[in-house]
Amino acid sequence: MFHITVLAVGRLKEKYLTEGAAEYLKRLSAYAKISVVEVEDGSLPENPAAAGGEKVKEKEGERLLGRLRPGTFLIALDVRGKMHSSEEMAEILNRLALSGRSDITFAIGGALGLSEKVLERAAMRLSFSRMTFPHQLVRLILLEQLYRWFKIARGEPYHY
Protein backbone atom coordinates (compact mmCIF):
# COMPACT_ATOMS: atom_id res chain seq x y z
CA MET A 1 0.00 0.00 0.00
CA PHE A 2 1.17 3.49 -0.79
CA HIS A 3 2.18 5.88 1.95
CA ILE A 4 1.43 9.34 0.59
CA THR A 5 2.37 12.52 2.42
CA VAL A 6 1.18 15.95 1.41
CA LEU A 7 3.80 18.28 2.85
CA ALA A 8 2.50 21.83 2.72
CA VAL A 9 3.45 25.30 3.85
CA GLY A 10 0.66 26.90 5.88
CA ARG A 11 -2.74 25.80 7.07
CA LEU A 12 -6.00 25.69 5.17
CA LYS A 13 -8.07 28.62 6.36
CA GLU A 14 -11.19 28.70 4.22
CA LYS A 15 -14.09 26.42 5.16
CA TYR A 16 -14.67 25.23 1.59
CA LEU A 17 -11.02 24.14 1.34
CA THR A 18 -10.98 22.31 4.67
CA GLU A 19 -14.25 20.53 3.86
CA GLY A 20 -13.08 19.58 0.37
CA ALA A 21 -9.73 18.32 1.67
CA ALA A 22 -11.45 16.28 4.39
CA GLU A 23 -13.73 14.65 1.82
CA TYR A 24 -10.86 13.62 -0.46
CA LEU A 25 -8.74 12.42 2.46
CA LYS A 26 -11.66 10.18 3.47
CA ARG A 27 -12.00 8.82 -0.08
CA LEU A 28 -8.25 8.28 -0.42
CA SER A 29 -8.07 6.18 2.75
CA ALA A 30 -9.34 3.20 0.73
CA TYR A 31 -6.30 3.39 -1.55
CA ALA A 32 -3.37 4.59 0.52
CA LYS A 33 -2.17 5.60 3.92
CA ILE A 34 -2.30 9.36 3.49
CA SER A 35 -1.20 12.13 5.78
CA VAL A 36 -0.99 15.88 5.57
CA VAL A 37 1.94 17.59 7.26
CA GLU A 38 1.82 21.35 7.57
CA VAL A 39 4.78 23.58 8.30
CA GLU A 40 4.60 27.19 9.41
CA ASP A 41 4.50 29.78 6.67
CA GLY A 42 6.75 32.81 6.89
CA SER A 43 5.67 36.42 7.18
CA LEU A 44 5.83 38.05 3.79
CA PRO A 45 7.70 41.34 3.50
CA GLU A 46 5.96 44.34 1.94
CA ASN A 47 7.80 43.69 -1.31
CA PRO A 48 8.05 39.88 -1.63
CA ALA A 49 10.08 40.22 -4.85
CA ALA A 50 12.93 41.68 -2.82
CA ALA A 51 15.59 39.64 -1.01
CA GLY A 52 13.32 39.33 2.03
CA GLY A 53 10.97 37.14 0.00
CA GLU A 54 13.81 34.76 -0.84
CA LYS A 55 14.67 34.47 2.85
CA VAL A 56 11.06 33.56 3.65
CA LYS A 57 11.08 30.92 0.90
CA GLU A 58 14.40 29.50 2.15
CA LYS A 59 13.11 29.21 5.74
CA GLU A 60 9.91 27.54 4.57
CA GLY A 61 12.05 25.19 2.47
CA GLU A 62 14.17 24.26 5.48
CA ARG A 63 11.01 23.44 7.42
CA LEU A 64 9.74 21.26 4.57
CA LEU A 65 13.05 19.42 4.17
CA GLY A 66 13.17 18.85 7.92
CA ARG A 67 9.89 16.93 7.75
CA LEU A 68 10.84 14.56 4.91
CA ARG A 69 11.11 10.88 5.74
CA PRO A 70 14.39 9.28 4.65
CA GLY A 71 14.03 7.55 1.30
CA THR A 72 10.72 9.15 0.34
CA PHE A 73 10.17 9.87 -3.35
CA LEU A 74 9.69 13.64 -3.39
CA ILE A 75 7.45 15.27 -5.99
CA ALA A 76 7.58 19.07 -5.93
CA LEU A 77 4.53 20.95 -7.14
CA ASP A 78 6.01 23.74 -9.20
CA VAL A 79 4.52 25.94 -11.92
CA ARG A 80 7.73 25.31 -13.91
CA GLY A 81 7.42 21.54 -13.54
CA LYS A 82 6.29 19.07 -16.16
CA MET A 83 2.59 18.74 -16.87
CA HIS A 84 1.05 15.27 -17.14
CA SER A 85 -2.45 14.04 -17.82
CA SER A 86 -4.31 12.22 -15.07
CA GLU A 87 -3.79 8.96 -16.95
CA GLU A 88 -0.04 9.60 -17.19
CA MET A 89 0.17 10.29 -13.46
CA ALA A 90 -1.74 7.08 -12.70
CA GLU A 91 0.86 5.23 -14.79
CA ILE A 92 3.72 7.02 -13.01
CA LEU A 93 2.31 5.90 -9.65
CA ASN A 94 2.02 2.34 -10.98
CA ARG A 95 5.65 2.39 -12.13
CA LEU A 96 6.78 3.74 -8.77
CA ALA A 97 4.92 0.95 -6.98
CA LEU A 98 6.40 -1.71 -9.28
CA SER A 99 9.88 -0.38 -8.58
CA GLY A 100 9.28 -0.60 -4.82
CA ARG A 101 8.76 3.14 -4.32
CA SER A 102 5.55 3.27 -2.30
CA ASP A 103 6.56 6.14 0.02
CA ILE A 104 5.76 9.33 -1.88
CA THR A 105 5.74 12.91 -0.65
CA PHE A 106 4.20 15.82 -2.52
CA ALA A 107 5.62 19.21 -1.50
CA ILE A 108 3.52 22.37 -1.81
CA GLY A 109 5.27 25.67 -1.20
CA GLY A 110 3.88 28.82 0.33
CA ALA A 111 2.76 32.00 -1.39
CA LEU A 112 6.21 32.40 -2.96
CA GLY A 113 6.61 28.79 -4.07
CA LEU A 114 9.29 26.27 -3.15
CA SER A 115 12.91 27.02 -2.33
CA GLU A 116 15.68 25.93 -4.68
CA LYS A 117 16.86 23.40 -2.07
CA VAL A 118 13.48 21.68 -2.08
CA LEU A 119 13.36 21.72 -5.88
CA GLU A 120 16.88 20.24 -6.03
CA ARG A 121 15.92 17.46 -3.59
CA ALA A 122 12.81 16.55 -5.61
CA ALA A 123 12.92 13.47 -7.82
CA MET A 124 10.17 15.00 -9.94
CA ARG A 125 8.66 18.44 -10.52
CA LEU A 126 4.96 18.43 -11.33
CA SER A 127 2.85 21.30 -12.63
CA PHE A 128 -0.94 21.28 -12.78
CA SER A 129 -0.99 24.28 -15.10
CA ARG A 130 1.07 27.17 -16.37
CA MET A 131 -1.35 29.37 -14.46
CA THR A 132 -0.59 30.28 -10.86
CA PHE A 133 -2.99 29.06 -8.17
CA PRO A 134 -3.13 29.93 -4.47
CA HIS A 135 -1.08 27.33 -2.60
CA GLN A 136 -4.06 26.43 -0.41
CA LEU A 137 -6.19 25.65 -3.47
CA VAL A 138 -3.35 23.55 -4.92
CA ARG A 139 -3.65 21.25 -1.91
CA LEU A 140 -7.30 20.55 -2.70
CA ILE A 141 -6.51 20.05 -6.40
CA LEU A 142 -3.73 17.61 -5.47
CA LEU A 143 -6.01 15.57 -3.21
CA GLU A 144 -8.67 15.37 -5.92
CA GLN A 145 -6.06 14.33 -8.48
CA LEU A 146 -4.60 11.68 -6.17
CA TYR A 147 -8.07 10.19 -5.81
CA ARG A 148 -8.56 10.31 -9.58
CA TRP A 149 -5.13 8.70 -10.21
CA PHE A 150 -5.91 5.80 -7.89
CA LYS A 151 -9.32 5.28 -9.51
CA ILE A 152 -7.73 5.27 -12.99
CA ALA A 153 -4.92 2.93 -11.89
CA ARG A 154 -7.48 0.42 -10.59
CA GLY A 155 -9.70 0.71 -13.64
CA GLU A 156 -12.55 2.02 -11.52
CA PRO A 157 -15.05 4.58 -12.83
CA TYR A 158 -14.44 8.10 -11.68
CA HIS A 159 -17.32 10.05 -13.20
CA TYR A 160 -20.73 9.06 -11.92
Image (tube, helix red, strand yellow):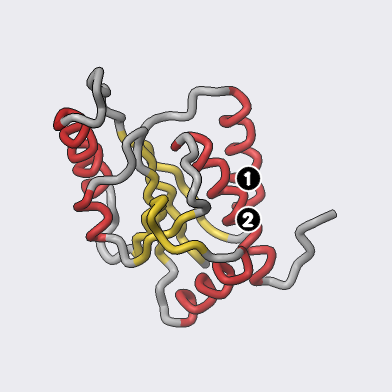
Percent of width and height locating residue 97: 48, 75
Q: Which residue is mark 2?
A: 147
Alpha-carbon span between mark 2 and mark 1: 7 Å
- Pointer 2 local density, CA inside 10 Å: few below 14, some 14–19, many at least 20: many
Q: In this rendering, would 45 be left or right of 151?
A: left
Percent of width and height locating residue 119: 27, 56
Q: Residue 88's quadrant in the figure? A: bottom right
The amino acid pointed to by label 1 is Tyr
Q: In this rendering, would 14 be left or right of 123?
A: right
- Residue 94 sits above or below residue 39 on the image: below
Secondary structure under the numbered disc 2 in the rendered image: helix
- Pointer 1 local density, CA inside 10 Å: few below 14, some 14–19, many at least 20: some
For the point 43% across and 59% down, the residue is: 126
Residue at the bottom extreme? 99
Residue at the right extreme? 160
**Along the line of sight, the residue nearer the viewer: 100 or 16:** 16
- Residue 93 sits above or below residue 122 on the image: below
Q: Residue 90's quadrant in the figure? A: bottom right
Percent of width and height locating residue 142: 53, 49
* Circle 2/circle 1 CB separation < 8 Å: yes
**Along the line of sight, the residue nearer the viewer: 33 or 130:** 130
For the point 38% across and 55% down, the residue is: 80
Percent of width and height locating residue 11: 42, 29
Q: Which residue is mark 1?
A: 24
For the point 27% across and 23% down, the residue is: 44
Residue at the top extreme? 46
Which of pointers 2 and 1 lies earlier in the amino acid sequence?
1
Q: From the image, which quarter does the C terminus lie in?
A: bottom right
For the point 57% across and 45% down, the residue is: 141
Secondary structure under the numbered disc 1 in the rendered image: helix
Q: Residue 63's quadrant in the figure? A: top left
